[in-house]
Image (cartoon, grey):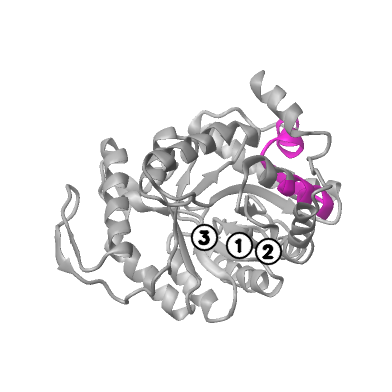
Amino acid sequence: MSNAQDIEFGLDSFVPISVDASGRELSGDVVIRNTVEEAVLADAVGVDSFNIAEHYRKEMMDSAASIILATVAGRTKRIRLGTAVTVLSTQDPVRVYTEFATLDAVSNGRAQLIAGRGSLIESFPLFGFDLNDYEDLFEEKLDLLVRMLRDQPVTWSGKFRSPLTNQYLSPPLPKGHLPVWVGVGGNPQSVVRAARYGLPLMLAVIGGPPIRFLPLIELYKRALDKFGKPLQRIGMHSHGLVARTDQEAADIQWPHWAHVFENAAAERGWARPTMDRFQAEVDEGSLYLGSVETVATKIAWVIRLLGLSRFDLAYATGRVPHEQKMATIELYGREVIPRVRELLSDPAEEPAPRDQSPASANARSSSV
């Protein structure tokens, strides 16, 4: 794990359609403008990065992250700007490079990327790709993107796009700019791929005890060693919300969390959401929800448990109103992040969420 002061604390957004205080659904354009304001506030309160995902669904307005992030860049000075995932399988890596190299230029070196295969697959038919090529598409496109970032001019050929011969891409990137992480939801092959390319690993943990990802982290470290790559950074993305009390946070988040997972259950065959499941995710799973102290303690615990150097909070799941999102951003930046750094800097502190300890978590995990 990195020094406590070196750990990156981010916020991730799916730019979901939200509601106002009366429960009225907002239009997509308002949601996008609200997201810009949320990112500007994140910069003001000391959050390290603001990252936008990529979906093509009627309930999410995050299909053009680079444009939203460029708007944010013009109104901020410090915060890193990136993607919570770029679905590289259905993107043109050349276009990804040019858009985010340009974002890096306009933001004075603050752009970053998380490249992933995508757990939702609506972009495949939308852009004319075959799901049978799911693995091969990502492998080939990651290879091209990494080559463009590391060595220009590029000469390259593959199966899914036209070859490049002695090609320069513009704008040029200064050395070390536009860091690219590989996003992984739990697939061992994806972990090994990230190690083979020598890229940092971002774990997308949306449910269950975080300790179940320890074997993947160990696999990643062994693979880095096997491929002769230096140790890379490891991050985690999980959902959560911060309020003044645990009860207030639960009251705000529960109906919107239930709405999201009710729809997911119908679409993907998952178990329907229940209050017991919600509470289990808060107590010992991957929902970072509660007061400043509750959330900070749990984040510090998981950073130590998994040896993380980055933690991204996917703040306020679902249709949570903009005002409540702004409140959670304020608390996360001004109070949670400093408290986590304090906990991690004190060797006497051994933070664990609620009644959970790493040992008890391991026992519960092994019995599942």
Q: Is residue 289 magenta?
A: yes
Q: Is residue 284 above or below residue 169?
A: above
Q: Judge by depth and name the residue closer to the eye, 24 or 196.
A: 196
Question: Which residue appears at 59% of the width and 71% of the height?
Answer: 79
Q: Amino acid at mark 2?
A: His
Q: Magenta segment range?
A: 276-300
Q: Amino acid at mark 3?
A: Ile
Residue 322's tag is 2
Dot 2 crowding, Cα within 10 Å, few <14, some 14–19, many 20+: many
Question: Which residue appears at 55% of the width and 69% of the height?
Answer: 80
Question: Which residue appears at 79% of the width and 40% of the height?
Answer: 352
Q: Is residue 218 above or below residue 365?
A: below
Q: Amino acid at mark 1?
A: Leu
Earlier in the chain: of badge 2 and badge 1, it is 1
Q: Is residue 225 shown to the viewer in this render?
A: yes
Quadrant hosting residue 2: bottom right
What kind of secondary structure does the magenta stretch mostly adopt? helix
Q: Which residue is identified by label 3?
A: 52
Earlier in the chain: of badge 2 and badge 3, it is 3
> Nearer the viewer's eye, disc 2 or disc 3?
3
* Image quarter in which the C terminus is found: top right
User: Considering the numbered disc 2 on the image, is that residue within a helix, a strand or a loop?
Assistant: helix
Q: Judge by depth and name the residue closer to the eye, 290 or 28.
A: 290
Q: Which residue is identified by label 1?
A: 26
> Nearer the viewer's eye, disc 1 or disc 3?
3
User: Considering the numbered disc 1 on the image, is that residue within a helix, a strand or a loop?
Assistant: loop
Do tag 2 and tag 1 residues touch (Cβ < 8 Å)?
A: yes
Q: Is residue 102 above or below residue 329?
A: below
Residue 39 place in picture, x, y as percent: 61, 69
Question: Which residue appears at 67% of the width and 53% of the height?
Answer: 316
